[in-house]
Image (cartoon, grey):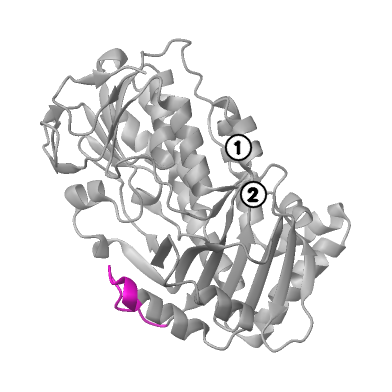
Amino acid sequence: MKKRNATRVLISGASIAGPVLAYWLTRHGFSVTVVERAPALRKTGGHAVDLFRPAMNISEKMGVLPRIEERATGTHRMTVHREGARRPVRADLSKIFSAASDRHAEVMRDDLSEIYHDATRDHVEYVFGDSIAALSPDGEVRFDNAPPRRFDLVVGADGLHSNVRGLTFGEESRFSTFIGAYLEVLTLPNTAGLDGELLMHVGVGRTAGMYGARHLGDARALFLFRSERELDHHRDVPRQKELLRGAFEGLHPDVDRWLAELDRTPAFYFDSITQLHMDTWSRGRVTLVGDAGYCPGPAVGGSTTLAIVGAYVLAGELARGDGDHEYAFPAYERAMADHVRASRAVALSAAKTLIPTSRLGVSGLVQGARLISALPTGPSRALLRLTTKSARLYNSMTVDDYPPPPTAPSARTVLAGAPDGDLRVE
């Protein structure tokens, strides 16, 4: 096996999985470079993501849990308007979250990315404003801007539309499965003064929500809607906005006001809710982590927790194998296989619940939230565990412990587009 301190790892993607993987690899003694296409950490609005017990435990080991808890959205109330109903239903979200998981935090995705980056920047070389252009079997990597470099291993942590996966495995369409729904997020003024509250409107085949966070000066609107077929919208923002307006026409005046911000919003995200199904996430010196390899479905499948767990396991198995990818990559895939399969099932179930397919489903979602929040904590937790697969999955997800050595390499941050070797020490 290779000596660990000679193993150079290139990670593509500086969002969530990339920095978490970088943290644990450096703790295990690897030399790590992270390349990110964006010119800096993304601060484009984003949306709230859930961290369940395994991700919270890993974050605690990283020493960043206090920052995560400080940046938690603080959303603890929910007001749900059922399409056609006169009176809304109010629910205690804090009780629902505590019933779903005994350790949980909701945090903005951009905040989480910043927290993990800050935990790694003193020990990891970050290259912003660049991307991988080509990969060779012998480890040579060509970039869009920087000179070619050689690495022992390359990891794609670059999301659902992974560049590394495309270069290594081919077209995304070979592995993606559309589950019949779309997700949209936009940033808008918090004119409703939402503080700790999620406001939702639910109809057959469509759900819209708006929330603020205690540290945000604005708010986010989240839209989910069903479609029996995939829609033609790729990289066509006007078309995406047209589809969104059409899907939510007439749901409620609140939703009409949110949609009125579409042409003024500073940040807008639109994509299909898609699962990835791959027989293997590894080929030669290359492997994938998080959404790049096994996205269960954005917004419905707990993909953030799964990505954090996957990054921790991959780093641990590489450490066990002393950098030998022929040992570590199969071990990583075996350790994650059951979690990935279960997450796919959870996503399908969650999508059906969050975007009801019938009026009965709409009533079930609304009344279920009210019942769980109205019951005492013990019975509500039992009811939620009986009725949702996600709570059972994330409460039972376990991973091995991979204790790292106490040493770590020194810090380096490379300037985007700088000549090879032109480094800035922070």
Can residue 229 be found in the magenta stretch?
yes
Q: CA distance from mark 2 to mark 1?
A: 10 Å
| Horizontal side, residue 377 vs residue 159: left or right | right
- Residue at point 64% right, 49% down? 73
Inspect this view and state whether residue 381 appears: yes
User: In this image, 259 relative to 362: left or right?
Assistant: left
Tell me the kind of residue under disc 1: Ile
Task: Give the residue type that dot 2 points to.
Answer: Thr
Q: Residue at x 53, y 30 (%)?
A: 400
> Relative to 305, does residue 319 appear above or below in the rendering?
above
Q: Is residue 312 visible?
A: no
In-front residue for pair 239/194: 194
Span colored in magenta? 228-239
Q: Position of residue 401 (x, y in %)?
A: 54, 26
Which quarter shows the C terminus? top left
Q: Residue furthest right?
A: 376
Q: Earlier in the sequence, mark 2 or mark 1?
A: 1
Q: Quadrant of residue 170?
A: bottom left
Residue marked by disc 2: 73
Looking at the rendered structure, the secondary structure element under dot 2 is loop
Image position of 163 (left or right of 63): left
Question: Label 1: which residue?
Answer: 68
* Image quarter (top left, top right, bottom left or bottom right) of the N terminus: top left
